């Protein structure tokens, strides 16, 4: 794993902490990372030495249900967004307000979608169906 990939993975994992992202560690255990979790502390320091310590389980954008797409588009100021699903990366229109991008990013993180393309880069696993119970 390159330094750039490590930074991308750490940035992504930190943004997902409030939502209980699940990861597979170096011995094959699945654990949920949350703020204050001992696994998070071990993962962070071990990643500094062993780049391939853990990978998150994320949902490909193609797994989004029509209900989820509708939920996203119904969020405040999101009516003008379109759902793009190309190569596991979501593209936003450059003409949406900053507040909208923030809401959309948080929504993707809360629903554990791989909007940064980590699965395609080998930095994340595809989450098994129903791994995450998304609360509305």
Image: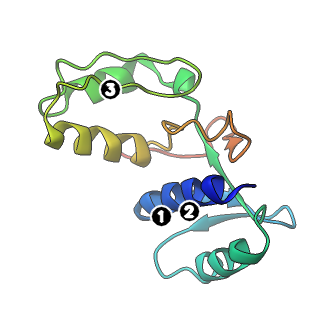
Percent position of residue 43, x then y: 67, 74
Residue 9 showing in the rendered view: yes
* Callout 3–callout 1 Cβ contact below 8 Å: no
Single out the mark in the foreground, 3 or 1.
3
Percent position of residue 17, x then y: 46, 64
* Callout 2–callout 1 Cβ contact below 8 Å: yes
Specify which label sits upstream in the sequence, 3 or 1. 1
Seen at 59% across and 75% down, the residue is: 40
User: Which image quarter: residue 127?
Assistant: top right
Q: Quadrant of the C terminus?
A: top left
Single out the mark in the foreground, 2 or 1.
2
Circle 2 packing at 10 Å, graded few (<14), some (14-19), many (20+), is some
Residue 1 numbered tag: none
Q: Quadrant of the N terminus?
A: bottom right
Circle 3 packing at 10 Å, graded few (<14), some (14-19), many (20+), is few
> Most extreme residue toward the front, as rendered?
3
Secondary structure beneath disc 3? loop
The CA distance from mark 2 to mark 3 is 22 Å
Residue 10 numbered tag: 2
Percent position of residue 57, x then y: 65, 48
Q: Which residue is mark 3?
A: 92
Residue 14 numbered tag: 1
Seen at 38% across and 26% down, the residue is: 68
Q: Disc count in the image?
A: 3
In-image side of 56 versus 98 (left or right) = right
Specify which label sits upstream in the sequence, 2 or 3. 2
Secondary structure beneath disc 2? helix
The CA distance from mark 3 to mark 1 is 22 Å
User: Which image quarter: residue 52?
Assistant: bottom right
Secondary structure beneath disc 1? helix
């Amino acid at each position: 794993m390159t330094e750039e990939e490590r930074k991308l993975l750490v940035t992504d994992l930190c943004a997902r902490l409030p939502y209980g992202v699940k990861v597979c560690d170096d011995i094959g255990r699945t654990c949920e990372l949350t703020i204050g979790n001992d696994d998070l502390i071990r993962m962070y320091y071990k990643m500094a030495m062993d780049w391939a310590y853990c990978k998150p389980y994320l949902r490909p954008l193609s797994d989004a249900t029509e209900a989820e797409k509708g939920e996203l588009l119904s969020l405040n100021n999101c009516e003008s967004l379109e759902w793009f699903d190309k190569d596991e990366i979501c593209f936003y229109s450059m003409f949406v307000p900053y507040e909208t991008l923030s809401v959309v990013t948080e929504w993707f993180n809360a629903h554990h979608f791989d909007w940064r393309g980590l699965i395609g880069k080998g930095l994340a696993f595809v989450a098994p169906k129903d791994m995450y119970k998304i609360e509305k």
